[in-house]
Image (spheres, rainbow, N blue to C red):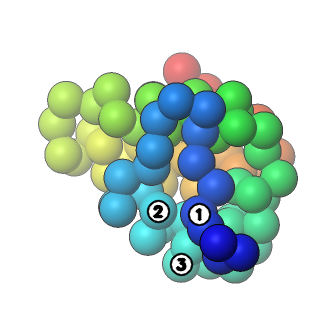
Amino acid sequence: MANAFPQGTVHEAGDDLRTALQADPAILALWEKLTPLGRNEFICWVDDAKQPQTRQRRIERTREELLEGKKRPCC
């Protein structure tokens, strides 16, 4: 499948994270350049949020960190 969304080594991005990353072609390109392990760490960090608001903040932070050139989540 040529247009398959790149996932992590173990975890798969939830629909909300996937939608947020695919909303901006530049951010999606940065996501695609991450190693599967790097993607896995971002996915795990987002999934670890206990509150929906925290999850949403972490999704936004993921987008920001990708634009900043980060390869792993901040926390």
Whole-percent x, y for residue 66 in the image: 70, 51
Query: What amino acid is labelled 1 in the image?
Result: Phe
Q: Is residue 48 above or below residue 2?
A: above
Q: Is residue 44 left or right of residue 33?
A: left
Q: Is residue 11 left or right of residue 1?
A: left
Whole-percent x, y for residue 15 in the image: 35, 62
How packed mark 3 is, by other alpha carbons closer than 10 Å (few <14, some 14-19, many 20 or more), is few
Q: Secondary structure at mark 1?
A: loop
Residue at x 33% of width, y 27% of height: 48
Residue at x 69% of width, y 66% of height: 27
Label 3 to label 2, Cα distance in Å? 9 Å
Q: Are marks 3 and 2 in contact (CB under 8 Å)?
A: no
Looking at the rendered image, the disc whose residue lies closer to the viewer, 3 or 2, is 2
Label 1 to label 3, Cα distance in Å? 13 Å
The label shown at residue 23 is: 3
Q: Which residue is identified by label 1? A: 5
Q: Which residue is identified by label 2? A: 18
Residue at x 66% of width, y 45% of height: 65
